[in-house]
Image (cartoon, helix red, strand yellow):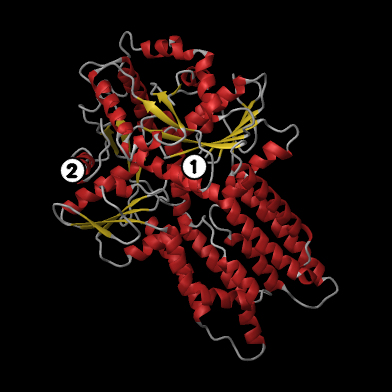
Amino acid sequence: MGKTTCAAAAALVAAEGGRRVAVISTDPAHSLGDAVGQRLGAAPRRVSTRGGTLEAVELDADRALARWLARRRPMLHTIAERGTYLDDEDLERLLRLSFPGVDELMALVELARLADRGRWELVVVDTAPTGHALRMLDMPQTLRRIASVLDAMYAKHRFLADSLGRGHRPGAPDRLIEELDADGRRLTELLRAPDRCRFTWLMLPERLSLEETRDGVAALATAGIAVSELVVNRLTPAPADPCALCEGRRLEEGRVLAETRRAFPTLPLRALPALEREPRGAPALRAVGRLLHSRAARGQRAVAISMPLLDFERGGETPPRMPPGSRGVRRRLESNALGQPGAVASWLERIAPEGVRLLVFAGKGGVGKTTCAAAAAVALARRWPEPRVLVLSADPAHSLGDVLGVALGDDERVVPRAPAGLRARELDADRALARTRERYRRAVEETFDSLLRGSRFDVAYDREALHGLMDLAPPGLDELFAVLSVIEALIEREPPYDVVVLDTAPTGHALRLLEMPATALAWVHALLAILLKYREVVGLGEVAAELVATARRLRELSALLGDAGRARVVAVTRAAELPQRETGRLLARLRWLRLDVPAVLVNALTGGACRRCRRVHRAERRTMAVPGRGARLRRRPWGMISAPAVAPPPRGVAELERWVRTWVLEG
């Protein structure tokens, strides 16, 4: 049970309270339809309820962009034509380019359009995972920056009209600029108004999730957005016959819960239990919704965790002691027969045989993708005599450093107690794009300085317009510039790395990143064609050199991704219905992209000995065996790797190495 399930459950209960409610998914990898048990699309569709009205929407960013551009294309064309030296052919070349990186901007624009209809009293939004949800919430400022750039471009036309004595009469282009600025301002005000917009932050009772929550809540606060409450999801109930795995989980969850209270002393805190089966459909969602809307959940600002869920309230914030024998989980892992080197070699050879240079880990948020990527990188670094392995995080909400137990940044760093050849890095996409923008701005300045040398012609408006073009770079382009570091690590660096392990953002944005090189290459070629056409006016210089270098790297990245002998993608999932369904869609898309998938890694399989753990284990196996879900994953040419649940989750090189020796290749 995750974020989407909780959003659907909250919307269902609110609707059955007699309200007109919409639940809207802005995550590119939609699973809202899976949660409510029916097919959804970009148009609102009715969900059966016992009362009130509930409609559900899975936003389609591409359709939203097409609709947005269709009405505004003539005005954008007019602004660019009057504000730059580009002709009709150049403008059409640029306007035809559609980036798969406008998800966040279009999601917010479309969300505002739907909400403005006034047909709903309450809108519940299921956002993309943390990093891209935060980016979406920054989109109102992006709209205002776009309006500012367009205004600077159109200023030249206004100036010439006034200079020629005709005077400028505001028209459709002016109204478009005003519309964009007003939309940005209105959305900013809405997001910052706690009486009109409430933010609920969902987290797991795990240290990685807590660190991500700290960063996310702080980022929202910096943007002037307040979080109303925290929901701690998937807390382990107290079984009648606790086993070592359950007690180990409860011990770690108690510590994380106590630390969460200290970190957010004024925020209301709700708790949801870990369910034995994934809720799907109205009856199951209704039960979850009742938990979310219980008296304790609606209570005062004091934290109240109900006693049946967790017994951590007694004695203040001291978690229960682990009973005798609970450390048997660790001992069994260390002495397990699977802990032999051959066990690691079998699955490792499956996903990364000799010759593989790039290993990409992709999957739904919350399945443990980063932990699996880090563990595989450590195993790779142990495989040969001193191989050079770099593990990169491309997820804006980085947690790689937390998994490895080392502070990471946008540079390659040694991992303590790891094999000598292992390095780690958390890519800073904003910094990568900022560096590109700065080089672009310097080149623009040099170009216009040379134009003005010995001339009385003032091209200040053209200079300002070209300065602003890089501010119109779509979301996702920054991540692409960052991921081009893969080419630097594997080809341009001396000596190069033998293997790069790439930990991507969750499904929707990972696919966007894997699709983007070809589209971005078309964009670069369009800009180069324009520069070549106008080289007598603006010259080529540093801008062209930068674009040529970027084009070469994009071609190399595309060639690398398409070569099954050098690049492979591992899909990480869990044995629950929603993750399985999303993984099926991920695999289908990867096949369409002609990317090689050697294995599906099923993470956190329950192996405890109590009655509850055995029931959960049976439910996991049933999910993996149902046609159209797990069985669909087995019928394909990829293998299945099973990774057991460990309490607490592995952190640091030593724990990762113990855990990775328990992985099993099933086929």
Say whether residue 446 is left or right of residue 575: right
- Residue placed farthest to the right in the image? 454
Relative image position of residue 501 (x, y in whole percent): 58, 33
Label 1 element class = loop
Could you tell me if residue 566 is visible in this image?
yes
In the image, residue 271 sits, relative to residue 316, either above or below, namely below
In the image, residue 418 sits, relative to residue 506, either above or below, namely above
Q: How many labels does the image show?
A: 2
Residue 146: quadrant of the picture:
bottom right
For label 1, count other residues whose C-alpha is less than 10 Å away and answer few (under 14), some (14-19) or many (20+).
Answer: many
Relative image position of residue 492 (x, y in whole percent): 73, 40
199 or 9: nearer the viewer = 9
Q: Residue at x 35, y 42 (%)?
A: 581
According to the picture, the residue beneath numbered tag 2 turns out to be 283
According to the picture, the residue beneath numbered tag 1 turns out to be 505
Amino acid type indicated by mark 1: Ala
Residue 368: quadrant of the picture:
top left
The mark nearer the N terminus, 2 or 1, is 2
For label 2, count other residues whose C-alpha is less than 10 Å away and answer few (under 14), some (14-19) or many (20+).
Answer: some
Relative image position of residue 94 (x, y in whole percent): 60, 67
Label 2 element class = helix
Q: Circles 2 and 1: CB distance less than 8 Å?
A: no
Q: Give the CA distance from mark 2 to mark 1.
A: 32 Å
